[in-house]
Structure formats: C-alpha cells, structure tokens
Image (cartoon, helix red, strand yellow):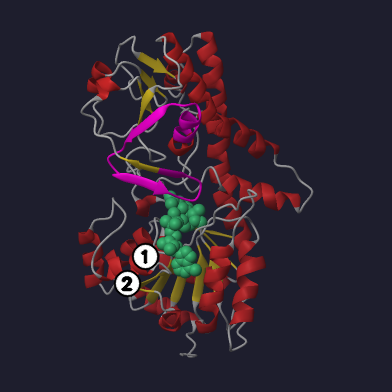
C-alpha cells in the first residue's frame, strides 16, 4: 500500500500533463460516460464497481448501456482504461470520483448505504494529497457530515481532510452530475461543472481536473452549496412538472389542449420555461432527489411544502392515466376488466434504456389489478422481470397485430414508433405524451 503523498502543485501538474490517474467508483449511467470523457482526453482511468459482471464486460471491451457502444469502451481501453473491484488500487490513484446510487429506502428516506459503503471501502487506501470527489446526488451536508468523518476514521495513517491553504491531507469536494440522458441538444462538455470543496486546494484541483473535460467549472464556497445546487435544479423541474400535470387535468375538463397552451406560452422570450405534462415522473433523479431535502429539512423543524405538494400531484399521474383509459374503453362499450391493452414504451423517457421509477411499471401493475390483460412493446427491453419496485415477468410484444388490442396506451414516446401507422391500425389509442400531435383521428384520446 502506497503512503506517498503528492503536493498540490505536483498533482496539478500531473493533471495538466494527463499523467494523473483517475479512479471512478460506480460504472453506471453516470460513472461510465464520465470515464469515457476523461479517457478521450488521454487520462488513464480505472473504473471501480462491485458488480463483477460489469467489470468483466468492460474489461472484455463490451458495454451494458445501449447508448455506449463497445467501440467506445475499446477506444478507452487503448487510452489505458480498465475496470476492477479491487479497492486496493485506490492507493495508486491521484483522484477518486464517487458516482454510486443514492435511492430512497422503503420509508421514502435517503438510503446512503452505497455512499457509506464506498467511502468505507476506499478509506483504507487513501493517501495525503489525493483528491476525493463525491458526485452522487444527495442532501446538503452529506460530504461534511458523512464522507469526511468516514474517510478520517477509516484510513490507517490518521490522515485528516485539508481545511485551509497549505494543509497536507486529503482534498475532498462535492461536484454534482448534471447530465440529462437522451438529451442531445447540449453536449456533455458544455454543461458547466459546479464544484464545492472542503478546502481551497480541493477546489483548485477539482477545477483543474474537470476543466480538462468541461468547458466551464463553477467553483462555489462549500460542498453544501454544491449539494444544494443540484437539489434546487431537480426540485425546480419536479415542481414545474407537477404544475403542468395539474393544469393539464383542469384543461381537459375545460376542453382546452394544454400542449397548445404551452406551445403558445413558450413564445414569450423571457420569464417562461416550457415543461410538459405526462403519465408521471421517472428516472433516478426527479422522483427521488427532492425527498432527500424534505428529509433533511425535518432536522431543522422545516416542512418543504412545495416538494410534498409536487410529489402528491406527480405520484397521482399514473392513477389519472388509468381513470382516463377506463373512461376511453367505456366509450367503446368495453370494461377494463378483460380488455387487452398494449402499453407502448417502458423506459421512463423516450429513447433511453432506463426503467428506474418508470411510470409504465406502475401503470402496468394498476391495469393488471383492474383485470386487464397487459402487453408491452419497447425496442430497448426484450424482456422485463423483477426490479426494486416491480415484478412483471413479461416479454416484448411485436407491433404486427396492433388490431387485436382493445387499446394501445402510449406511455413513452420513443422516436422509433410510426405513430400514424399505429393509429391507423389500432382500435383505440390513449396518448399520455402528445406523441400523436398533428394526427387527426377520433380513435385518439389524449390525456
Ligand atoms: N442517471 C442519471 O441520469 C443521473 C443524473 C444526475 C445524477 N445522477 C446521480 O448519480 C448517482 C449515480 O447514478 P447512476 O444513474 O450512475 O446509478 P447506476 O445505478 O447506473 O450506477 C451506479 C453503479 O455503482 C455501482 N456500485 C454500487 N455500490 C458500489 C460500491 N460500494 N462500490 C463500487 N461500485 C458500486 C453499481 O454496481 C452501479 O454500477 C446517483 O446519485 C444519481 O442520483 C444520476
């Protein structure tokens, strides 16, 4: 085990010359693309993951994320990329970036066990002068209250986290991941990187490291400010999505097309940002992150009413979709009980292969509870089995015989679907995403 320390100017120089070794813990949707970005900049990256199957796939030049091709992994391998589950390799890293999951537990409270597990695993191998950055989304205070004490307690050399200029110790920072999977309108390196450090050295090093792959780095005064920045961004989305989801329900009663309203409102060149209604929230971020803050707020005798209200509206959306589907079937003299329903799209948003917290999963379960026979089609999922909150065990249904279903329910508006053809062949289409915009047919119910 190496105990050699690196001085701040030395490490900065190693970053600038691309000699710095960077370890990224968690080779998932965030960590793996980040590893590839650094590799493309000629850094030698080591990816750490506890899932042996992921380590094996990566080391054999393969990929398990649809939008990352095996060729991308192989290109990174040529720049020195490799994966491991052996934490002792942390000792040879100059910087370690942590990108592990931060879900909610069954009581809807933050589950930081992946973060604490990771920090406990790396702590025995850290050394003075290293930069440790947490990227996992979490509540303000996590870096200072959880990560720092575990690093200080768990390393055998009595190393402390640096606090002021000139301190010899570990440089610790928080830098939120702000990626939007499937959104190709902004290149990843054009998304500014926010960094808050426990000491000025951490900010200086993190700025140098991230500045080599991101066009702009935004230093803030503390890890807590960086943690809160990420939560503000996601709460802003969550609250605004809830607002349009609620107004959509009112507009439906009033006979107004909410999408037409949003299209008109967004022509205003200032003061309005368009958000779109849908069948409910999904993904690892928007349905979860706001509750990290609600939970933390209780420590300060504070109730985050906007977050709770937005959660209430958004969680209700799959139930609203079920009511609308039952009403549409009723108009066709059909009961939901015994109907054959094809759900189009499983992933939580279009054109990505991510099922986490997807409203489709809740909708399928609710349809089944009402006695419907449910099928699904999704180009990204040939089969869907069990996950954290679902147990479906279903196979992908091809789109050959759309005529046979009593209703086709569009939950995810993948770009590969030919919506005109689907509407032509279906008996009834319930569209929760405005995917059939511009198609005139009395078979379509938009909700
Ligand atoms: N996916 C997104 O779009 C996105 C965007 C912004 C922020 N985030 C945040 O980034 C973090 C990571 O999310 P993700 O989507 O990449 O998760 P993920 O589940 O895709 O990947 C996490 C990886 O960490 C690994 N892992 C878990 N515990 C580990 C441990 N102790 N040691 C090593 N590896 C371990 C898992 O095996 C998995 O491969 C979360 O906090 C999330 O909220 C995600």
Circle 1 sits on which residue? 212
Residue name at image x 57 percent, y 28 percent: 243
- Label 1 Cα crowd, 10 Å radius (few <14 / some 14-19 / many 20+): some
- The label on residue 43 is 2
Q: Is residue 432 left or right of residue 198?
A: left
Q: Position of residue 225 (x, y in %)?
A: 61, 56
- Looking at the image, residue 253 lies above or below residue 71: above
- Looking at the image, residue 236 lies above or below residue 324: below
Do the numbered discs 2 and 1 sit on residues whose CB atoms are within 8 Å?
yes
Callout 2: helix, strand or loop? loop
Mark 2 within 8 Å of ligand 1, using the beta carbon: no
Residue name at image x 59 percent, y 61 percent: 112
Q: Position of residue 218 (x, y in %)?
A: 50, 57
Magenta region includes residue 312 = no
Quadrant of residue 54 within the rendered picture: bottom left
Residue bounds of the magenta highlight? 363-392
Structural distance between the alpha carbons of marks 2 and 1 = 10 Å
Residue name at image x 41 percent, y 18 percent: 446
**First in sequence: mark 2 or mark 1?**
2
């Amino acid at each position: 085990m190496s105990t050699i320390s690196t001085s701040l100017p030395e490490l900065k120089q190693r970053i600038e010359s691309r000699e710095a070794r960077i370890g990224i813990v968690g080779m998932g949707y965030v960590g793996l693309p980040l590893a590839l970005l650094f590799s493309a900049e000629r850094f030698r990256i080591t990816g750490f993951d506890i899932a042996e199957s992921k380590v094996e796939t990566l080391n054999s030049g393969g990929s398990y994320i649809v939008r990352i091709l095996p060729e991308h992994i192989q290109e990174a391998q040529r720049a020195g990329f490799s994966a491991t589950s052996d934490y002792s390799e942390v000792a040879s890293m100059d910087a370690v970036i942590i990108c592990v999951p931060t879900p909610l537990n069954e009581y809807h409270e933050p589950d930081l066990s992946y973060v604490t597990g990771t920090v406990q695993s790396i702590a025995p191998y850290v050394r003075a002068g290293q930069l440790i950055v947490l990227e996992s989304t979490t509540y303000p205070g996590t870096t200072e209250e959880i990560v720092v004490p575990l690093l200080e307690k768990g390393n055998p050399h009595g190393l402390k986290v640096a606090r002021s200029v000139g301190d010899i110790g570990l440089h610790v920072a928080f830098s939120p991941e702000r990626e939007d999977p499937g959104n190709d309108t902004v290149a990843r390196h054009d998304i500014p990187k926010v960094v808050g450090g426990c000491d000025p050295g951490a900010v200086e090093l993190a700025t140098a490291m991230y500045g080599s792959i991101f066009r702009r780095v935004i230093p803030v005064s503390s890890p807590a400010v960086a943690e809160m920045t990420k939560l503000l961004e996601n709460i802003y989305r969550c609250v605004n999505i809830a607002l349009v989801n609620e107004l959509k329900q009112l507009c439906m009663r009033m006979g107004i097309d909410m999408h037409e309203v949003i299209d008109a409102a967004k022509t205003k060149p200032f003061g309005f940002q368009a958000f779109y209604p849908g069948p409910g929230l999904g993904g690892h971020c928007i349905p979860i992150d706001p509750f990290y803050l609600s939970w933390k707020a209780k420590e300060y005798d504070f109730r985050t009413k906007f977050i709770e209200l937005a959660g209430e509206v958004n969680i209700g959306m799959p139930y609203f979709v079920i009511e609308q589907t039952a009403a549409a079937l009723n108009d066709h003299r059909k009961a939901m009980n015994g109907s054959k329903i094809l759900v189009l799209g499983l992933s939580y948003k279009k054109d990505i292969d991510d099922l986490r917290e997807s409203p489709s999963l809740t909708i399928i379960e609710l349809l089944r509870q009402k006695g419907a026979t449910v099928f699904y089609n999704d180009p990204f999922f040939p089969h869907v089995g069990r996950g954290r909150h679902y147990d479906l065990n279903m196979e992908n249904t091809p789109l050959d015989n759309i005529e046979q279903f009593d209703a086709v329910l569009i939950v995810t508006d993948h770009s590969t679907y030919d919506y005109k053809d689907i509407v032509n062949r279906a008996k009834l289409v319930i569209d929760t995403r405005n995917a059939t915009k511009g198609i005139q047919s009395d078979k379509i119910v938009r909700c």
